[in-house]
Image (spheres, grey):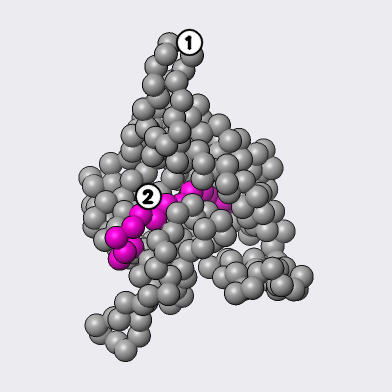
Amino acid sequence: FWTAPDSIDSGNESQKNRRLRVAYNDPTITSAVQHVESNFQSIRDEYFSAVLGLGNGVRTESDHVLKPLEPDYDVASKGGEHAEDALHSGTWDWHSYILNGNRNDEFADRCPKTAQVLDELEKEGMLFGTPFSFCFFSTLHGKSSIRPHTGPMNLRLRMHLPLMVPNVSEEKIPLSSTNNTRPVTGIRVADQVREWKEGSAVVLDDSYVHEVWNDSEETRVLLLLDLWHPDVKAVERESISNMFDYARDKGWIGGGKRE
């Protein structure tokens, strides 16, 4: 993990502790975290409107009632971004703005503020820009889990902005093989376990083995987005992006040649 959990009393948190929340006090990741967290309420509101259909309006030019966005990635058959089989059990929905590096115009139309926040990260050179780039609302329903797996590379860091977290954080589930317990809803990266807190971003290196679970009856929702790993320098990012562009133009990745 590149972010430490918030202190119990964040209102009285010292300036030193706030600086230490992001690993190595990295200025790029700190800036990205602050930018996304500052837009938490707007992003959450757009999820409620676009995905859940709460507060949806009518398009005046056609009197057409807007329908909730449909999930746009078949995790049952494709697994994750690189898995051959399903990674999850239960129900896991994706609503993507960026999928394999490609933008979804419908998402931008329905969630303009969320798209703007992500586009601003891209303008600052923070947003990971390859066919392995993803930005989506990740909805993990109750009694669902994502089995241990690894990302395909360590060129990126992955951020979670929790929008809805089941209110069961004080409960613990005993593990049958040990005397340890784990949160009812949480994520494990390597040997570290975290719980989510609404509005408080979590940043992780997903090249390490990680798994996610939601053993509650409620739904867990987060905005997931990929950032360039800060150890990848600007000249290296350009070379990597050019390499992927060449591979995509040749039809080696990304479903064939681009038009």
Is the residue 170 above or below the residue 79 in the image?
below
How far from the left and from the top, in percent, is residue 22? 64, 66
User: How many neighbours does mark 1 have within 10 angstroms: few (below 14), some (14-19), or many (20 or more)?
Assistant: few
At x 35%, y 85%, the residue is 180
In magenta segment, residue 41: no
Please tell me which residue is depicted at 59% across the width and 66% down the height of the picture: 3
* Most frequent secondary structure within the magenta stretch: strand
Q: Quadrant of residue 166?
A: bottom left
Name the residue located 27 percent from the left edge and 51 percent from the top edge. Answer: 91
Q: Residue furthest right?
A: 15
- Residue 129 or residue 201, whichever sits in front: 201
Q: Residue furthest front?
A: 55
Question: Which residue corresponds to the image point at 35% horizontal and 70% vertical from the top-left?
Answer: 184
Q: Secondary structure at mark 2?
A: strand
First-in-chain label (1 vs 2)? 1
* Mark 2: few/some/many CA within 10 Å (<14, 14-19, 20+): many
Which residues make up the magenta segment? Answer: 214-228
Horizontal arrangement in the rendering, residue 114 relative to residue 79 (left or right):
right
Residue 25 placement (x, y as % from top left) = 70, 66
Which residue, given by chain and number where applicable, does mark 2 sit on? 139
Answer with left or right where residue 126 lies relative to residue 72. Answer: right
Tag 1 residue: 61
